[in-house]
Image: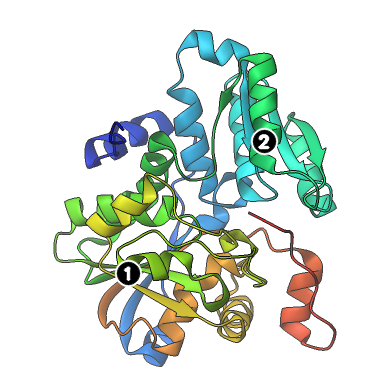
């Protein structure tokens, strides 16, 4: 079996050129209140302010723009119930391509509407009856379109790594970088960039306790898969196992993995909203939660990638007021 070709820092640099003028160079926010709370100098890279509200735009646009003309003409297919769906839809529109997004029938209406609003054709499926990968594969077979998976794709990973590259360009070398982790595209891309640009930086991935497949894989040095979709409010990190690319990159480039509870995420999102004036989705606040609780165990100059701000209105209300039953989360990111 042929070993997969893994992305390198050179690929991240190429992605930065492709994204120039397309992706926002998102702001880096600091807070003396946060610094005093955690005993460190913290730099928040605000990908919640990226186009379509998340870092996913970087990887999607890089992957689509790397396609040859013949492939672009046949369009792209993706499967996602959240940020990847919107990222592929927007990127395809910008590049004049057709996009078909496979989404579960119970995905939040706001995300369905946003994906269609960017011009994509949405194909709904019943998550209780069908596998999204099978549905997407059928569309690819029928149309000849290119499949762009959410995280396990070299150009997607390289594109995501541009967030960390921008951060280090702006603030200089870091002692540590905290990165949220679902399937590991942002984490491994960021680790590649951080170790090339700030060699002394410790890169730490952060997962929800209920969705710790990458943490288990890192600790055992073998791929681990969860038996069911994790029931965590971090809906962007509800993956069940590492990818064929992200697993070896995890072992090569990431220094540690930690987990935080849903209760930790509630406190982080609430703090971000009320004190930092930043809207974060729970998945986007994983790094902040690890820093606030001390679970990351780092000091000095610490970068945190805030990965997204597409929080459902009912979820945000529940987090801020904590006076009602927790809203249900979509089945997979």
Instruction: Decide: is 137 above or below 195.
Output: above
Instruction: Decide: is 114 above or below 93.
Output: below
Q: Disc 1 on helix, strand or loop?
A: helix
Figure quadrant of residue 4? top left
What percent of the width, then of the height, locates residue 224?
Answer: 44, 62
Figure quadrant of residue 210? bottom right
Q: Examine the rendering and report whether any part of residue 99 can be seen.
A: no
**Residue farthest left in this picture:** 199
Residue, disc 2:
134
Report whether 250 appears left or right of 82. left
Q: Disc 2 on helix, strand or loop?
A: helix
Q: Examine the rendering and report whether any part of residue 296 can be seen.
A: yes
Disc 2 packing (10 Å; few <14; some 14–19; many ≥20): few
Residue, disc 1:
220
- Of callouts 1 and 2, the N-terminal one: 2
Report, in whole angstroms, how far the alpha carbon at label 1 lies from the one at label 2: 30 Å
């Amino acid at each position: 079996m042929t070993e997969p070709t893994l992305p390198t820092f050179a690929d991240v640099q190429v992605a930065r050129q492709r994204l120039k003028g397309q992706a926002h160079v998102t702001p880096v926010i600091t807070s003396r209140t946060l610094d005093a709370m955690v005993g460190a100098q913290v730099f928040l890279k605000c990908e919640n302010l990226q186009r379509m509200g998340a870092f996913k735009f970087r990887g999607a646009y890089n992957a689509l723009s790397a396609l040859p003309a013949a492939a672009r003409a046949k369009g792209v297919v993706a499967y996602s119930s959240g940020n990847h769906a919107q990222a592929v839809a927007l990127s395809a529109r910008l590049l004049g391509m057709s996009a078909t997004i496979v989404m579960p029938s119970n995905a939040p209406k706001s995300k369905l509407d946003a994906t269609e609003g960017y011009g994509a054709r949405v194909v709904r499926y019943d998550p209780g009856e069908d596998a999204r990968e099978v549905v997407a594969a059928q569309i690819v077979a029928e149309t000849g379109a290119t499949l762009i998976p959410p995280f396990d794709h070299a150009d997607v990973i390289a594109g995501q790594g541009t967030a960390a590259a921008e951060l280090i360009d702006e603030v200089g070398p870091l002692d540590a970088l905290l990165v949220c982790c679902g399937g590991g595209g942002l984490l491994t891309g960021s680790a590649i960039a951080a170790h090339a640009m700030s060699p002394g930086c410790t890169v730490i991935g952060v997962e929800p306790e209920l969705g710790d497949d990458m943490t288990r894989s890192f600790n055992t040095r073998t791929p681990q898969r969860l038996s069911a979709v994790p029931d965590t409010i971090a809906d962007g990190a509800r993956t069940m196992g590492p990818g064929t690319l992200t697993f070896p990159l995890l072992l090569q480039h990431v220094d540690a993995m930690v987990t935080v509870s849903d209760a930790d995420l509630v406190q982080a999102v609430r703090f971000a909203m009320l004190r930092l004036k930043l809207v974060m989705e729970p998945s986007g606040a994983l790094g902040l939660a690890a820093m606030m609780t001390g679970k990351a165990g780092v000091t000095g100059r610490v970068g945190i990638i805030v990965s997204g701000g597409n929080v459902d209105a009912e979820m945000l209300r529940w987090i801020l007021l904590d006076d009602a039953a927790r809203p249900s989360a979509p089945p997979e990111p």
